[in-house]
Image: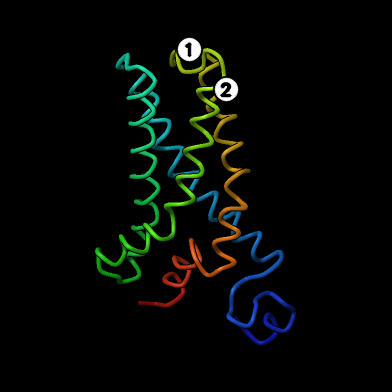
Amino acid sequence: MDQHHEHVGVGDAAGRPEGAALNRLAVSATLHCLTGCAIGEVLGLVLGTWWGWSNGPTIALAVALAFVFGYALTIAPVLRSGLPLRRALAVAFAADTLSILTMEIVDNAIMLAVPGAMEAGLLSPLFWGALAFALAVAFVVTVPVNRALIGRGKGHAVVHAYHHAGH
């Protein structure tokens, strides 16, 4: 960060973003989380529904895949920065666990709360509409979680340190 940006209040004394910069970073981190969660969630719900599973196993598969894809989207660029796999895994777990967990709790609760959504089938607008709505609400709920984490130098702030460190 150059002197001009520090002077106009982009970061605090510890170099953490503040204000609009913090909001942008939180939205970016949440979009990143949403991408991994949505891939895993959609794949899990589609597979569970296609296989005729009940709600419990279908949601368990969707949540597990959301974590797998969410972590994978963080691990890949961290590995490219030169970090060894064990350290990259630790960074991804530290950066993404609370964000993914928040998103998964919210979107699955909504899917269960929308009458008939889980039973609607893959060709139903109800299934896809409820899923889109659930992911959108989960995004809105998760932005402040990521904002709080990044503001404390946690969450995706850790990942960004590796993106800019040039390891």
Location of the N terminus by quadrant is bottom right
Residue corresponding to mark 2 = 129
Q: Is residue 89 left or right of residue 150?
A: left
Image quadrant where residue 18 sits: bottom right
Binning the other alpha carbons within 10 Å of mark 2 as few (below 14), some (14 to 19) or many (20 upward) gives: few
Residue 127 placement (x, y as % from top left):
51, 19
Tell me: residue 40, above or below residue 17.
above
Label placed on residue 134: none
- At 49% from the left and 66% from the top, the residue drawn is 154
Query: Pointer 1 and pointer 2: residues touching (CB < 8 Å)?
Result: no
Residue 8 is drawn in which quadrant?
bottom right
In-image side of 7 versus 13 (left or right): right
Q: Residue at (72%, 77%) from the top-left corner?
A: 9
Position above or below: 74 against 44: below
Which amino acid type is marked by label 1?
Answer: Ala
Numbered badge on residue 120: 1
Q: Quadrant of residue 114?
A: top right
Tell me where residue 78 appears, x and y as whole percent. Answer: 36, 64
Q: CA distance from mark 1 to mark 2?
A: 11 Å
Secondary element at image label 2 = helix
- Under tag 1, what secondary structure? loop
Q: Residue 42: image x %, image y %? A: 42, 30
Circle 1: is it few (<14), some (14-19), or many (20+) Cα within 10 Å? some
Image color mode: rainbow
Q: Quadrant of the C terminus?
A: bottom left
Residue beneath the point at 29% across and 17% down: 51
Residue 6 is situated, as x and y percent measured from the top left of the image, at: 67, 82
Residue at position x 37%, y 64% in the image: 91
Question: Does 2 sit above or below residue 59?
Answer: below
What amino acid is labelled 2 in the image?
Answer: Gly
